[in-house]
């Protein structure tokens, strides 16, 4: 692939981040999906910069934050990048993306008349190297923009590491897998854990909202799903004022069947 600016954010298992960056008029780069690391491979492998473009290494700024705990890594960053940029977020061995969320960045309404029409400024992909058991998020930016991202990666065993080379996605395609959308309906009995951990919440309202989220995602209405998730967050906010309550909820739902796992993914989306 060709680009003007490539920024690789390599995350270590302890949460440390190193940045490898190269810029030129146009240069070629690749993510090596089917090649093993060798003694000559660069630190940022499976990424490969082809040709004589110079790659510099630096530490991240204060806007880059990571938390590594219990085989999970929470990564958060803010970006201001020109058009023709590719951002690669490279996870440690055996870590794959679990939840992805973009931070809201409002436009400055100066000199704008009428309705503002927004268009997607780029594409997202996930690449996998099956040999090295490494994966990376790729953000292809087509126009100058400012945005923020939060994502949660989880460590998995070799035998379930994805066997495909790459796929294109949006944030809900990661958070809510196709298998979880096979859930038919969420019942109030499925919310007993929420009632036990938080208490003093309107379980009927939470149940209705979760089913609205499920329905919206099945129908491909991701804007409505995000709106309803925001409503769910407001409904849970009082009882979840203590961070440990949300962690306890997520852990309790993670080990259940498809319905519980669907609820767990929605809660994780709210958590990050």
Image (spheres, helix red, strand yellow):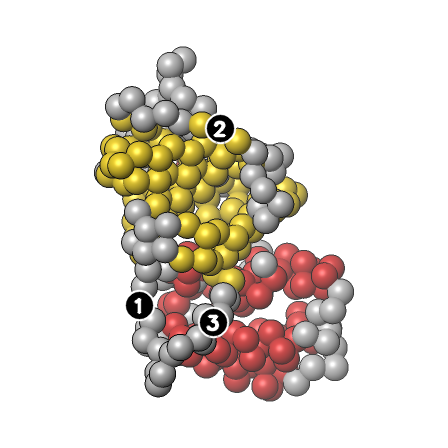
Q: Quadrant of residue 217?
A: bottom left
Q: Nearer the viewer, residue 49 or 40?
A: 49
Q: For the residues carrying marks 3 and 2, which lies nearer the camera in this image?
A: 3
Q: Nearer the viewer, residue 102 or 212?
A: 102
Residue at image mark 1:
119
Q: Residue at x 30, y 54 (%)?
A: 142
Q: Earlier in the sequence, mark 3 or mark 2?
A: 2
Q: State the CA–CA distance, disc 3 to disc 2.
A: 33 Å
Q: Secondary structure at mark 3?
A: loop
Q: Secondary structure at mark 2?
A: strand
Residue 68: percent from the left, percent from the top? Answer: 63, 42
Residue at image mark 2:
57
**Any part of residue 140 in sight:** no
In the displayed structure, 2 sits above or below 102; it is above
Mark number, residue 108: 3
Q: Secondary structure at mark 1?
A: loop
Please tell me how crowded label 3 is: few (under 14), some (14-19), or many (20+) other residues with Cα within 10 Å: few
Spot the residue most to the front.
111
- Callout 3 touching callout 2 (CB < 8 Å): no
Q: Nearer the viewer, residue 151 or 17?
A: 17
């Amino acid at each position: 692939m060709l680009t003007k600016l490539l920024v690789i954010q390599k995350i270590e298992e302890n949460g440390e981040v190193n940045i490898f960056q190269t810029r030129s008029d146009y240069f070629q780069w690749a993510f090596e999906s089917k090649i093993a690391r060798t003694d000559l491979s660069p630190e940022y492998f499976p990424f490969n910069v082809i040709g004589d473009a110079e790659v510099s290494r630096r530490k991240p700024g204060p806007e880059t934050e990571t938390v590594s705990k219990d085989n999970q890594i929470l990564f958060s960053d803010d970006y201001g990048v020109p058009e023709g940029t590719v951002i690669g977020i490279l996870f440690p061995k055996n870590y794959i993306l679990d939840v992805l969320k973009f931070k809201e960045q409002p436009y400055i309404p100066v000199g704008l008349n009428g309705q503002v029409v927004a268009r997607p400024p780029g594409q997202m992909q996930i690449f996998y190297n099956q040999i090295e058991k490494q994966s990376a998020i790729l953000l292809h930016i087509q126009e100058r923009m400012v945005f923020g991202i939060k994502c949660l990666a989880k460590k998995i065993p070799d035998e379930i590491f994805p066997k495909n080379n790459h796929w294109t996605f949006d944030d809900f395609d990661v958070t809510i897998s196709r298998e979880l959308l096979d859930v038919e309906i969420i019942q109030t009995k499925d919310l007993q854990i929420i009632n036990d951990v938080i208490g003093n919440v309107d379980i009927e309202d939470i149940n209705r909202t979760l089913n609205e989220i499920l329905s919206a995602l099945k129908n491909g209405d991701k804007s409505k799903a995000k709106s309803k998730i925001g409503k769910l967050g407001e409904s849970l906010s009082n009882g979840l004022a203590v961070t440990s309550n949300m962690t306890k909820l997520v852990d309790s739902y993670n080990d259940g069947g498809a319905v519980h796992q669907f609820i767990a993914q929605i809660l994780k989306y709210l958590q990050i």
